[in-house]
Image (tube, grey):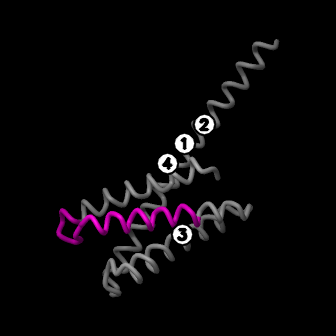
Amino acid sequence: MKLRESIVISCVSYTAVMIIISILNGMGISDLNWIFNLELFVVTTLISLFMYIIDKLNIESQPVYMFLQIISVAISVLGIGGGIMKWFRWTLEYVSITTGVFVVVYFITYGVVFLINSITTEKINQKIAEHNNKEN
């Protein structure tokens, strides 16, 4: 994972969370304020850092890789966000909603990064094919 990909992960996850929380805010389930926005940015950046470190472990199994990533998100969101930053009360309702949000955001972010990587791979393959055609 490169720095560019880490930045994309942080930005996509922050955006996805803000959209979901804005919807929840509109439904009266959550409150937004500028301090929360900054805390959220810190947590999404921490998640990106954890994912960068997990990527450097070169784990072969995709399910294990994804499990470790989700655990790092849980540690960041539940531990830092819920524990240190006091984003929510530790009741089943709030922990369930928060867990649901971060799992959805994880898969949105994973999908966007997968799409970006697929597009990049396609462009690289296209350039290689063009180069090979020029040589023949």
User: Which residue matches tag 4?
Assistant: 112
Does residue 129 show up magenta in the picture? no
Magenta segment: 25-50
Is disc 2 placed on a helix, strand or loop?
helix
Kindly identify the residue that appears in the image at 63 percent across and 50 percent down: 2
Q: Residue furthest right?
A: 136
Q: Amino acid at mark 2?
A: Thr
Say what secondary structure mark 1 lies in. helix
Amino acid type of the residue tagged 4 in the rendering: Val
- Which residue lies at the image location 43% right of the left edge and 66% below the top edge? 42
Marks 2 and 3, how far apart at CA? 25 Å
The local secondary structure at tag 3 comes to helix
Residue annotated with mark 1:
116
Percent coordinates x, y for residue 104 in the rendering: 42, 62
Task: Give the residue number, with chain letter if any, for mark 3.
Answer: 70
Marks 1 and 4: CB-CB under 8 Å? yes
Check disc 3: other Cα within 10 Å, few if <14, some if 14-19, many if 20+: some
Question: Mark 3–mark 1 contact, CB under 8 Å?
Answer: no
Quarter of the rendering occupied by the C terminus: top right
Earlier sequence position, callout 2 versus callout 3: 3
Numbered label attached to residue 120: 2
Judging from the image, what secondary structure is the residue with disc 4 in?
Answer: helix
Front one among 78 and 125: 78
Which SS does the magenta portion mostly show?
helix
